[in-house]
Image: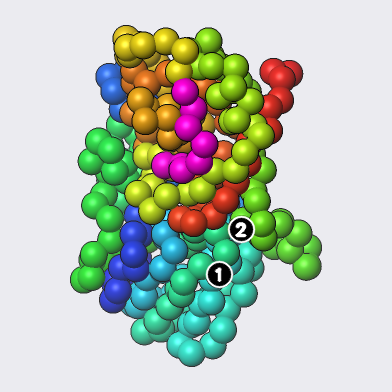
């Protein structure tokens, strides 16, 4: 089996699959890839099942050396990447030979890039998943220099999936404001009518202190109409919590399963991948939609 040595880990590179659903009752979030469609695409490109374990990079990617043959694909946030000096395309499978080095650079737009290997990463599952959860500490540690990743056996004869050219997905990072759809509630009754209006009328900025747990936003203060705190209640990915300072937090893949801050709105599930690609300093707006 091929092994991959980590020569440089990048800013934050973790092993991710489609997560570990079904454990929220004991305080374990689903976790898994923050941009799930990008992970699925990367796996399909190299002939894997959608949920095979791959790498998720954050802004700056790793440098990897292979001791054998592998099929690799890069998806998600577009990055400059080189294999033994040759430039590599995004969203296209490519072959790597023994001794070659893959360098994944800094994201040009967006935040998270996915590196999938034919056969996936052979990481031991915890509660049914190899995903790194930075909240609970479950799963493999984030990549460090000197780590060695074992790749799994290639299934189905190593057949890969190729997309029509040119590849159609839009770039994860867009100029100007990113617009995300939200469903207002369930705790909108904890906020003033002016705060509900501000949520969808004014811009917010992604703060540096954001991660896989949640995106901290800075913008107009969202004032409450009630005092005190709620008893802890269940949370879902995309929930927008508002602490007492009025600055919202948009929860992502490694979010806590319960919390007492009132949830003013919940992101439309189809917009979660776009939220996962927001980078510090980027501005966004919310638009309210109904439940349908």
Question: Residue drawn 78% across and 63% down?
Answer: 164
Residue under label 1: 108
User: Can you say whether 104 is above or below 75 in the image?
Assistant: below
Residue under label 2: 173
User: Can you say whether 27 is above or below 141 in the image?
Assistant: above
Question: Residue drawn 51% across and 67% down?
Answer: 107
C-alpha distance separating marks 1 and 2: 8 Å
Q: Counting other residues with Cα less than 10 Å from the Cα at mark 2, is it few (<14), some (14-19), or many (20 or more)?
A: many
Left or right of 39? Residue 25 is left
Question: Residue drawn 62% across and 74% down?
Answer: 89
Residue 146 in the image, given as x and y percentages of width and height: 21, 71
User: Can you say whether 27 is above or below 117 in the image?
Assistant: above
Q: Earlier in the sequence, mark 1 or mark 2?
A: 1
User: Can you say whether 257 is above or below 229 in the image?
Assistant: below
Magenta stretch, residue numbers? 216-223
Of the pair 274 and 52, the residue shown nearer to us: 274
Contact, mark 1 vs mark 2 (Cβ under 8 Å): yes
Question: Residue drawn 48% across and 90% down?
Answer: 85
Residue 44 in the image, given as x and y percentages of width and height: 60, 53
Of the pair 12 and 32, the residue shown nearer to us: 12
Instruction: Verify whether residue 283 appears in magenta.
Output: no
Residue 252 in the image, given as x and y percentages of width and height: 45, 38
Using the rendered view, name the quadrant where residue 258 is placed: top left
Of the pair 246 and 163, the residue shown nearer to us: 246
Residue 125 in the image, given as x and y percentages of width and height: 30, 41
Q: Counting other residues with Cα less than 10 Å from the Cα at mark 1, is it few (<14), some (14-19), or many (20 or more)?
A: some
The quarter of the picture where the C terminus appears is top right
């Amino acid at each position: 089996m091929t092994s991959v040595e980590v020569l440089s880990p990048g800013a934050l590179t973790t092993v991710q699959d489609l997560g570990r659903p079904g454990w929220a009752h004991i305080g374990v979030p689903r976790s898994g890839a923050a941009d799930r469609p990008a992970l699925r695409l990367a796996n399909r490109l190299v002939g894997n099942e959608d949920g095979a374990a791959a790498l998720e990079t954050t802004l700056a990617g790793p440098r990897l050396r292979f001791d054998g043959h592998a099929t690799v694909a890069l998806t998600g946030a577009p990055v400059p990447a080189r294999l033994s000096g040759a430039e590599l395309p995004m969203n296209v499978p490519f072959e790597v030979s023994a001794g070659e080095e893959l360098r994944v650079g800094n994201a040009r737009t967006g935040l998270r890039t996915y590196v999938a290997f034919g056969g996936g990463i052979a990481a031991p599952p915890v509660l049914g998943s190899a995903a790194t959860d930075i909240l609970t500490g479950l799963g493999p540690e984030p990549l460090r220099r000197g780590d060695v990743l074992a790749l799994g056996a290639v299934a189905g004869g190593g057949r890969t999936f190729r997309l029509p050219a040119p590849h159609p997905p839009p770039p994860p990072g867009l100029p100007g404001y990113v617009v995300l759809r939200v469903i207002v509630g369930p705790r909108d009754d904890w906020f003033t009518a002016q705060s509900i209006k501000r949520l969808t009328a004014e811009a917010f900025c992604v703060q540096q202190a954001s991660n896989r747990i949640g995106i901290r936003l800075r913008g107009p203060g969202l004032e409450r109409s009630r005092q005190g705190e709620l008893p802890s209640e269940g949370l879902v990915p995309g929930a927008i919590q508002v602490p007492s300072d009025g600055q919202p937090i948009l929860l992502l893949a490694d979010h806590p399963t319960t919390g007492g801050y009132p949830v003013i709105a919940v992101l439309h599930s189809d917009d979660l991948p776009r939220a996962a690609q927001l980078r510090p300093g980027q501005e966004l707006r919310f638009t309210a939609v109904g439940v349908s």
